[in-house]
Amino acid sequence: MPLQLPLAKKSNTQFGNKAPLKELLNRLAPHYDINSPKRGFNFPLEYWLKHEWRELVMDNVTKANLDDLSLSSSYFLKLTEKFYKKETKLVMEVWHLLNLILWHRKFKSEHNQLNS
């Protein structure tokens, strides 16, 4: 038995091609407003960086790792310090820096394994 919908059920003028999904959502969660506009999903990045991932940041944003990337260690160490002292909103800067360092360490490790 193929899982096919009749053409009339596949779309409608109100919801377009998402009509079957909207209909199902309306049955499963009638309290949910299916006509509300799209909205983004924010996650608590600042909280995670300052609490759950603080040790991860501190262990990785080091002079040695910054020097290995040829970045100004004094500048980025001060930036990270300011973030934790709540002097400024530097969430994205610390997040990007952490990711760059973690990516570089992984890339360097994999590169060394391939060449050994």
Image (cartoon, grey):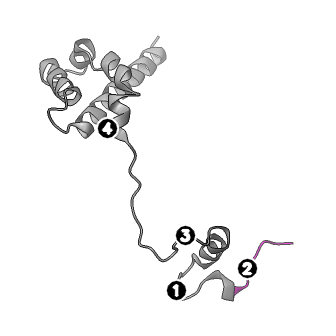
Q: Mark 3 vs mark 2: give the one in front.
A: 3
What amino acid is labelled 2 in the image? Leu
Residue drawn 55% across the image and 69% down it: 32
Find residue 52 and report its horizontal and vertical position in percent: 41, 28
Measure how far apart labels 4 and 1 are at the Cα level.
39 Å
Residue type pointed to by label 4: Glu
Q: CA distance from mark 3 to mark 1?
A: 17 Å
Q: Which residue is mark 1?
A: 14
Residue 41 horizontal side relative to residue 94, left or right: right
Q: Is residue 88 magenta?
A: no
Residue 51, numbered label: none
Q: Which mark is residue 32?
A: 3
Quadrant hosting residue 23: bottom right
> Earlier along the polypeptide chain: callout 3 or callout 2?
2
Q: Is residue 31 left or right of residue 72?
A: right
Tell me which amino acid carries mark 1. Answer: Gln
The residue tagged 2 is 5
CA gap between label 3 and label 2 equals 24 Å
Please give the residue where the numbered disc 4 appears in the rendered image.
46
User: Please, is residue 47 above or below residue 1 in the view?
Assistant: above
> Disc 4 vs disc 3: Cβ atoms closer than 8 Å?
no
- Looking at this rendering, what residue extends furthest in the right direction? 1
Q: Residue at x 82, y 72 (%)?
A: 2
